[in-house]
Image (cartoon, rainbow, N blue to C red):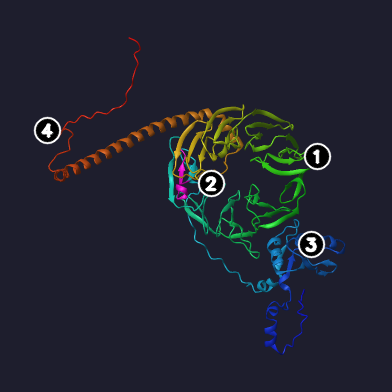
Amino acid sequence: MLLRTISDRYPISISDRDTSTKSKLLGDILREKPQEADGIDSVVVVDNVPQVGPERLEKLKNVIHKIFSKFGKITTEFYPEADGLTKGYIFLEYAAPTQALEAVKNADGYKLDKQHTFRVNLFTDFDKYMNISDEWETPEKQPFKDFGNMRHWIEDQDCRDQYSVIFEAGERTAIFANDAKEPITFEERARWTETYVRWSPKGTYLATFHQRGIALWGGEKFKQIQRFSHQGVSLIDFSPCERYVVTFSPLIDTKEDPQAIIIWDILTGQKKRGFHCESSAHWPIFKWSHDGKFFARMTPDTLSIYETPVMALIVDKDIPARVTLMQMPSRHEIRVRNLFNVVDCKLHWQRNGDYLCVKVDRTPKGTQGVVTNFEIFRMREKQVPVDAMEMKESIIAFAWEPNGSKFAVLHGESPRINASFYNVRNNGKIDLLKMFDKQQANSIFWSPQGQFLVLAGLRSMNGALAFVDTSDCIMMNIAEHYMASDVEWDPTGRYVVTSVSWWSHKVDNAYWLWTFQGRLLQKNNKDRFCQLLWRPRPPTLLSADQIKNIKKDLKKYSKIFEQKDRLSQSKASKELVDKRRTMMEEYHRYRETAQQVYQEQKTIRLELRGGVDTDELDSNVDDWEEETIEFFINEEIIPLGDL
């Protein structure tokens, strides 16, 4: 048992008999006088530690000390032994109880290796665990809540995608179904959110923000699915699997109970883990694996990787100036790339995970300028070969084709901004496909299906747009949406929306719908329009072979779709005629009512006008007087010369 006592010696000696005098003279000092304590509040117990002999004990101690010293100063370490081996559990004493609590919250569930996962507890918690009943209590059965078909929008017969729109300065939020002619209102509510909305990665949930937390909505009628209480929440992030949601609030955080960042279980609504947050400037804080089984967090000196659903720390290591590709959860390093003279480094993953581009800004020796290197990792090939490409111009934007081997780069300085398109070959060669010079662009937006993209000059560049087909690198159209602030592709890649948000510009707030070729279809003006977000689609259930067969038989399907489009157009024409006929009938009814009221009020008009009937323009002609008025306009003198 570890015990620690605090000495209460003072240099001033006053008789303890005269308590009143002592209190008067040393009141402030006595209030701060340390009290005797046994110190167990600062002790943690670590279970599932490897059992080793004397020859491996020192190495084990070094590993344990490196892991647990991150949470505070360790004053005492005790490794119980029996029969020449450690017992598999240890005692660590910290300098303060808060440090011990930090160790419990961060190291509990830490995976040392495949056989050993730490369980860390405060020593003071053992009384609580000893009092747990041995009798099993059956959990209370929760009633089933039917939220309807959570993916109903995918079953739309006309395959219309949905999007959310916030307008009237945030007072109204609507869900529209996209149509080439005009948007179809699906749902509209007042004050649905207090700031903005977010769709989950697969489109299942719509998240709305409120002062006390966030709410998730879904199903056919957008019923409330779940609520998460987090006072002052301002940012959220979803795991790719839609099982977890991360919320951030700058208002509440304590050392004992981290609440700045909270990870929630969407299905149960339970808090899974809290984290402190030094800065939210780079949101999202966590990077998730594609299946949501792992997430990582990087601080200035450390990379920490956690495993779900236990939210346990499995990697916590210092990162030198290098790029390491690590396989999880084995932590096997499959590729390492050392970096030198690094000023800045950014990672750009291709959506399918086929390629990784590491953008490295360097300052070569003997020079003052910055050179950018693109380190291209070919992830699907044996031993992950790396290709390098250097650019001496400043880089404005970089973007991978979502499902291909091409990437686009904006580089240079205004007004000479160039757009270059490259293709990565399997032999390691990076081909320059095309370069467009003198572009009015600062952003790249690839279609979700690849091949097509939009080069946009947003905000300061007045909304210049260039629609590009990268299969042969031609510009299909050049257009402009003045002061455009956002560009959003629909999930199919058939349509793209440009918009001017009231949040960034107070006039001309609207969103325009274009085809992927750059043909303008709609101009939708909304009072103080704020935000438009397309509803994502979940991954297709079709195999690669099935998709290939569909593309092969596309002409056969096209005839069916064209016929359906013609029927839709005739139906739309009939609907338009019916709508106009209804409007005309309403007008005639209103006109008849107005004429009836007009005739009923004629007697009153005659009384007010002294019996003079002014209902007709030619009435009372005998009482009219004619008066002619002349106005002098100008005078012009023309010399005739000698006659």
> Where's the C terminus, which quadrant?
top left
State how far apart marks 4 and 3 are (Cα). Answer: 115 Å
- Mark 2 or 3, closer to the camera: 3
Question: Quadrant location of residue 108?
Answer: bottom right
Residue hosting label 3: 65
What label sits on residue 403 in the rendered view?
A: none
Q: Residue at x 37, y 32 (%)?
A: 573
- Mark 2 or 1, closer to the camera: 1
**Vertical position of residue 557 compared to residue 76: above or below:** above
Lower sequence index among marks 4 and 2:
2
Q: Position of residue 478 (x, y in %)?
A: 54, 29
Residue 359 versus residue 225: which sits nearer the camera?
359
> Is residue 517 visible in this depiction of the protein?
no
State how far apart marks 2 and 3 are (Cα). Answer: 45 Å
The secondary element bearing badge 4 is classed as: helix
Lower sequence index among marks 1 and 3:
3
- Let me know if residue 589 is in the magenta part: no
Q: Are marks 4 and 3 in contact (CB under 8 Å)?
A: no
Residue hosting label 1: 365
Residue hosting label 4: 622
Residue hosting label 2: 203
Question: Quadrant location of residue 398?
Answer: top right
Q: Is residue 133 left or right of residue 164?
A: right
> Is residue 200 visible in this depiction of the protein?
yes
**Mark 3, residues whose alpha carbon is within 10 Å: few (<14), some, or many (≥20)?**
some
Task: Look at label 2 and name its amino acid.
Answer: Gly
Q: Which residues are magenta?
A: 166-179
- Let me know if residue 168 is in the magenta part: yes
Q: Position of residue 77 (x, y in %)?
A: 80, 68
Q: Are marks 1 and 3 in contact (CB under 8 Å)?
A: no
State how far apart marks 2 and 1 are (Cα). Answer: 49 Å
Lower sequence index among marks 1 and 4:
1
